[in-house]
Image (spheres, helix red, strand yellow):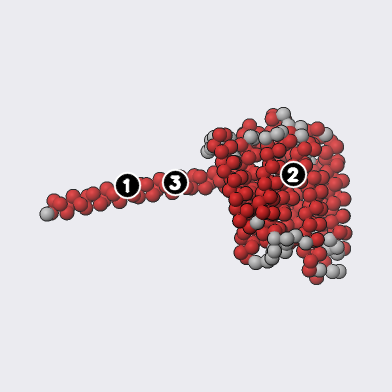
Amino acid sequence: MVVSGDSNLGTLEVSLFHLQRSTRSLLSHFRFHARTVLLFTAADMKTIFVPISVFACATAPLYSVPHFLSGITWIWSHQFMCNVSNQARGAEEDAVNKPWRPLPSGRITQSQAITLRWISAGLCVWWSAIYGGDLALTSLGLFFTTFLYDELGLAGHPIGKNFCNIGGYTTFEIGATKLMGAAHDMDNISTTAVCISGILIFTTVQVQDFADVEGDKRLGRVTFPIYAPEFSRQFTLIAITMWSLFLSYFWKIGPYFGAMYMVLGIILGLHLYLYRTEAHDRSSYILFNVWLTIAHIMPLHARYGLAWAAS
């Protein structure tokens, strides 16, 4: 009887050991894949997730915490779909510009990334369909734009790339705004804000390309900064300055805040024009996203007549 008890105890200890080992292995795999997922989206959190979230909260306007959580989850999942699609075809560029991303760092293969792209696209459309056919069409529109950008080569064309960026940003904004508002319909203010945002993106989004010139050249892409190195900076300086003036006037944010926004736009434009190293261009892109995020907040004043802008 004693021998039998010792034997059972030993078997239990072995079972617990294997259970602990399996649990540690499972947790290790989970951490690895969770980090891989986050690395796909990390670089664009400041360029897509934050500006789009701010835009939707200001434009919808935000109705409730559950609507907010639905909105930001929708934004992130669709950003993930776009990031996987883009990076599945851009490993060579990322090896130069962002070697820490999943493909150049060896965390995932290209074939796995392509499969993941199709799976994520299907899940995004399915999830959007739960909220209604109009949101499912928005997801399909975003996927179609991404497909044109990555698979049909519009990423390498200076005008085609900007048109794809219009499609991408506006579909993000439409979907997020529909989810964060009280209803899934867009009124005149939100529709106007999306239209202005689309034109704004079309004329200024080349700011993201200045820091990636070497990687784009290596892939044979012809972005605006590569096609017209000097003119692209001159054009961007003028465009950002004019947009700063127009947005302040159109959304009627008042002279004080309008003047501050103008100063920010001029500083951003001059920084892009005068300082042209890769490090400076990356700093300019961060400042651009601050400028863009403020632009996305302005529709709040059209809804509420915010007191801080009344003077």
Please state the horizontal and vertical placement of residue 51, each as a whole percent of the image.
71, 54
Q: Residue at x 28, y 49 (%)?
A: 15
Residue displayed at 35% across by 50% down: 20
Q: Secondary structure at mark 2?
A: helix
Q: Which residue is mark 1?
A: 18
Which is more foreground, mark 2 or mark 1? 2
Disc 1 residue type (three-letter): His
- Mark 2 or 3: in front is 2
- Which residue lies under the disc numbered 3? 28
* Crowd rating for badge 3 (residues with CA inside 10 Å; few <14, some 14–19, many 20+): few
Instruction: Say whether disc 2 or disc 3 marks the residue closer to the N-terminus.
Output: 3
Which residue is the site of mark 2?
A: 165
Kindly indicate whether the residue at mark 1 contacts the one at mark 2 (C-beta within 8 angstroms). Answer: no
Asked whether, in this view, residue 39 is left or right of residue 305, the answer is left
CB within 8 Å, label 3 to label 1: no
Q: Amino acid at mark 2?
A: Asn
Distance from Cα at disc 2 to Cα at disc 1: 51 Å
- Residue lying at the far left in this picture: please name it: 1
- Residue 148 vertical position relative to residue 65 in the rendered view, above or below: above
Residue at 87% across / 50% down in the picture?
242
* 131 to the left or right of 167: left
